[in-house]
Image (cartoon, rainbow, N blue to C red):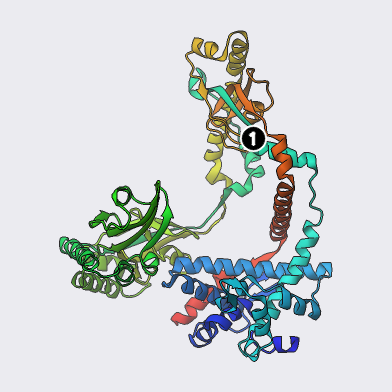
Amino acid sequence: MLQSMRSAAKYIWIILIVAFVGSFLLYETSGLAGRAPVTTTTSIATVNGEEILLTTWQNAVTALEQERQQQTGSTITLDERQQLEERAFNELVTELLLQQEYKRRGISVTDDEILQAARVAPPPQVLQSPDLQTDGRFDMQKYQRFLSSPMARQSGTLAGLEAYYRNEIPKQKLFDQIASGAYISDERLWQVYQDRHDSATVSYVALSPGSLTDTAVTVTDAEISSFYARNKKRFDRPGRAVVSLLTVPRAVTAADSADAKARIDAVRAEIVGGAKFEDVAKRSSADSVSGANGGVLGKGGRGRFTPKFEETAYALKPGELSQPVLTPFGWHIIRVDSRQGDTLDLRHILINIAQSDASATRTDRRADSLAAKAGSQEDPKLFDEAAKQLGLTAASVVAVEKEPLSFAGRYVPSVSAWAFSGVRPGETSDLFDSPEAYYLARLDSLTKGGQAPLADVKEDIRRRLARDKRIEKLRPMGEQLLQAARSLTLDAAAAQRNLTVEKSSPFTRLDAVPGLGQFSAAVGAAFAAPVGQVAGPFVAPDAMVVLRVDARTTANRQAFEAEKSVQRQQYLQSLRQQKVDEYLTGLRESVKVDDRRAEVLSQLRRQSDS
């Protein structure tokens, strides 16, 4: 059986899909499996001296792209591709690091372990396969019969399973070693339970720097340099690109709006005339997700939809069909299938208000004209001339590395990813398309990311330290308020000073409390000081705080004892995962990665242009 496993392809995530949905054929025949590498041995990075090849990375990205397209059914933008490229790269780096760690620790996997795991521990993807279920549940006997069949070998499933277990078994052994020391005593478990179930309510006075008569503070260059040195990671900055952006909007006319209204009226008339709501939804709804399920929006309470949609839905009786409803998404027809209190089971049909074919054709021609007139991608003057000829005004916008670009409240697809793909200042992009508009961009300037120099962040640090010092100047005032409150009451002492007493809602030790912060000394005092006692002063976000504990509720020990075994299991699972996460983070931080992707992609781009 194991020999059969080794007779086909390598990657489990592609091959398992092959066996059940046939995407391996798509992968092999689509032309995506190997996108014109500089050479077959070009390295895009080294991890502790071991190489990651360009072709390996491209194939990993392609597999993720195909998976995304199968899930969404839509074309991938450059922004989405950039995210998949980063994900694939990180996974390859992590895999190399794990392989290096297996060697260091002497972790291996035997053929017998693989065979045993394949027989009794199918991967999650296999468990979800409809072909291996009986009455909606995974059928182990059906799975084991499939493993013994010629189809399993011929489809590549056995090879995929071997690759999967050769990857997963050593990983599980490593993680078991890392998490083996996870332990929690009864007393610690009780403390964790208390942190989540004890609650306190406080009254407090927040003294703000505005109450100071003398706000002058001095922040020295030495203090700034010391803060910068201690917090260097805070000052890592992504790359920034300034682009000129031309927009050709898909303008919706009054005629387009009237056409959408006429279509929703026709849809409603069809249903009233006897057509099944579900069939019309599948055929006509612009909401492709719910439309494919007959318009189903599922069961839920209030707050799920826009106000006008929700107002109409809650006014309907079960089985009743609404009149056309206009929301920012377009025109809707709504039907309530059932109602229990505020819980509605809904269906809807959506008709978008979009350009008519004639309007869309005019927009397409204008956008094509812009792209043609902009001409050479390396002549910035043509960009300006094309804009002038078409009466368009370029907007100067800033794109941030690895973040999608937004402009005028809208997502602009692909421009940000393009700006950081190795293009040079002065170059013009391809024409990018979205449901709202066409976009053409020119890269005007590019600033690489990395740690910001002290000179660039010096004033920001100065302002932060000055704020902290001004808050600290409030301490004497807070101590005076504390003494007065102990002699009188917090309310009386505050009234004498024209200060306001705020009251909190009940909170736990883990909550972020408005005015007090999270995991702060003030929150801690709420669970340490006796009820009715005033405590402080404490540094809080932008203020100095004096507080009084008004009430406290303690966790129920009997309830804890009844839940202790479940709590222990959950906590140990969380603790083990935390140990693994910390280990992986430390492993990644200690690695020496020479990332040459930008250089290689830029070279590849020049090669394709020549």
- Give the residue at the far top of this rendering: 487
- Residue 118: x and y, percent? 72, 77
User: How many residues crowd mark 1 within 10 Å: few (<14), some (14–19), many (20+)?
Assistant: many
Q: Is residue 523 above or below residue 562?
A: above
Q: Is residue 378 left or right of residue 125?
A: left
Residue 293 shows up from this direction: yes
Q: Quadrant of the image for the C terminus?
A: bottom left
Q: Which residue is mark 1?
A: 509
Q: Quadrant of the N terminus?
A: bottom right
Please name whichever residue, 397 or 322, is drawn nearer the observer in this view of the structure. 322
Relative horizontal placement of residue 340, taking residue 253 as reference (left or right): right
Indicate the quadrant where residue 192 lies. top right
Residue found 55% across the figure and 32% down from its top: 541
Q: Quadrant of residue 101?
A: bottom right
Residue depicted at x 68% and y 89%? 7
Q: Relative to 2, is 473 on the left or the right?
A: left
- 284 with respect to 116 (left or right): left
> How many circles with numbers are drawn on the protein?
1
Q: Residue 33, can we see it? A: no
Q: Return the x and y of residue 48 as percentages of the image width and height.
A: 73, 68
SS at badge 1: loop
Q: Position of residue 119 (x, y in %)?
A: 72, 78
Q: Tell which of 403 and 170 is nearer to you.
A: 170
Return the x and y of residue 286 as percentages of the image width and height. Answer: 32, 66
- Could you say which is closer to the camera, residue 322 or residue 284? 322
Q: Nearer the viewer, residue 326 or 144?
A: 144
Image vertical order of residue 581 relative to residue 2, above or below: above
Amino acid type, label 1: Arg
